[in-house]
Amino acid sequence: MDDDDLVKQHSPLMSPLVWDLAHIGNQEELWLVRDVGGRDPVRQDIDHLYDAFRHARRDRPALPLLGPAEARAYVATVRDKALDVLDRVRLEGRRLTTDGFAFGMIVQHEQQHDETMLATHQLRAGAAVLAAPPPPGPAVPVGPEVLVPAGSFTMGTSTEAWALDNERPSHDVFVGDYLIDAAPVTNAEYAAFVDDRGPDVAPLHWTRDPSGWLATTFGRTAPIVPDAPVVHVSWHQATAYAAWAGRRLPTEAEWEKAARWDPATGRSRRYPWGDEDPGPEHANLGQRHLAPAPVGAYPAGASPLGVHQLIGDVWEWVSSDFTAYPGFTAFPYREYSEVFFGPDYKVLRGGSFGTDAAACRGTFRNWDYPIRRQIFSGFRTARDPRPGELA
Ligand code: AVJ
Ligand code: FE
């Protein structure tokens, strides 16, 4: 991208890209260089510009921000110092100033902003500048839905090293019998809803053509991929689709039980496929592909009950508000999650093709306003068993 594209605002919902870049460096400086390292500030004078609570996204272009060259030099200086501090900490443990947790938190913070910057790219007008190989095609057929039998499971974690405060602590949750889609709702399924209900429920970036629905993806317009998960829908649209289909969104506990509960052992896994970190065979993560993969593309990533593509592809809206787990304590600061708890925000789970593996796991919780759809958001549906169905 040229400097003009980095400095300008592509949507009032998003920061200028050059703001995200220097904000990544500023958070790294605050937490790793100053707090953990006890070093002198690099640029204390700019802290207020990159404090996300001080200026709304729509106001950021008017601030005296570092320009692209200055921002690149700033993040490089901070990175040098952070790597120097890294040599002096032990990586295990969660004590903030002596252990590695702050590094894990800052790695995830950078990757979260990297996904935010990808969402900004998706809102940018003009010729395409991003390219990546297409995702893998479908490798196995995937059935419609899976029964998850009633019982308790362990939700959240007290042991995952880089888990953020809102994922903690682990706690038992009873979930009654339910059925959940074996895959996210696809473009073809969603298009049937739009054709019935009208263009008001179309995802962001869809346009109608005599030949059918088209989607614009990072500056390229093409027919929707029928068997790929729908993306860029709001929580309200997802909820309306589910009702139209005679179903509902899963609760957050239902989503996590489908993703982590192993019926053979009764324990909760780190990921649907087990405890190993995600590899390219498990899930469409990390911006390797710039689109969701068709249903059936990741058989090695399925859960023991046969639920596919819970991790990667699209963030999945669940019905639940973003709330604290029992025993929650804010760490390392209230502004990470606690100030967002309540009915205003809905939860998204599982990560998207734009999410890095470092910022995605079975317990990871994302949240946003229910009207938002500039993020890489899709969903799957669930239902209660019908009377007598399980007899
Ligand atoms: C967890 C994705 C909602 O982007 O607002 C970035 C992550 N927090 N900087 C966000 C975050 C502070 C957060 N989400
Ligand atoms: Fe941030």
Image (tube, rainbow, N blue to C red):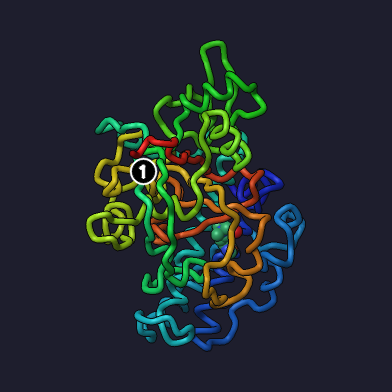
What kind of element bears circle 1?
loop
Q: Mark 1 is on which residue type?
A: Gln
In the picture as drawn, the residue positioned furthest to the left comes out as 264
Locate residue 326 relative to residue 65 in the image: left or right. left
Locate residue 59 relative to residue 123 in the image: left or right. right
Residue tagged 1: 309
Whether residue 20 appears in this view of the structure is no
Residue under the image location 63 percent in, 76 percent down: 43
Residue under the image location 45 percent in, 85 percent down: 95
Residue under the image location 75 percent in, 61 percent down: 63
Q: Which of the image's four quarters has the N terminus?
A: top right
Residue 100 x, y percent position in the rendering: 40, 79
Whether residue 45 appears in this view of the structure is yes
Residue 167 x, y percent position in the rendering: 47, 66
Question: In the image shown, does 372 or 342 lie closer to the viewer?
Answer: 342
In the depicted structure, whether residue 308 falls above or below residue 38: above
Question: In the image shown, does 390 or 72 lie closer to the viewer?
Answer: 390
Q: Which of the image's four quarters has the C terminus?
A: top left
Locate residue 150 relative to residue 332 in the image: left or right. left
Question: In the image shown, does 9 or 73 lie closer to the viewer?
Answer: 9
In the depicted structure, whether residue 223 falls above or below residue 14: above
Residue 274 x, y percent position in the rendering: 26, 57
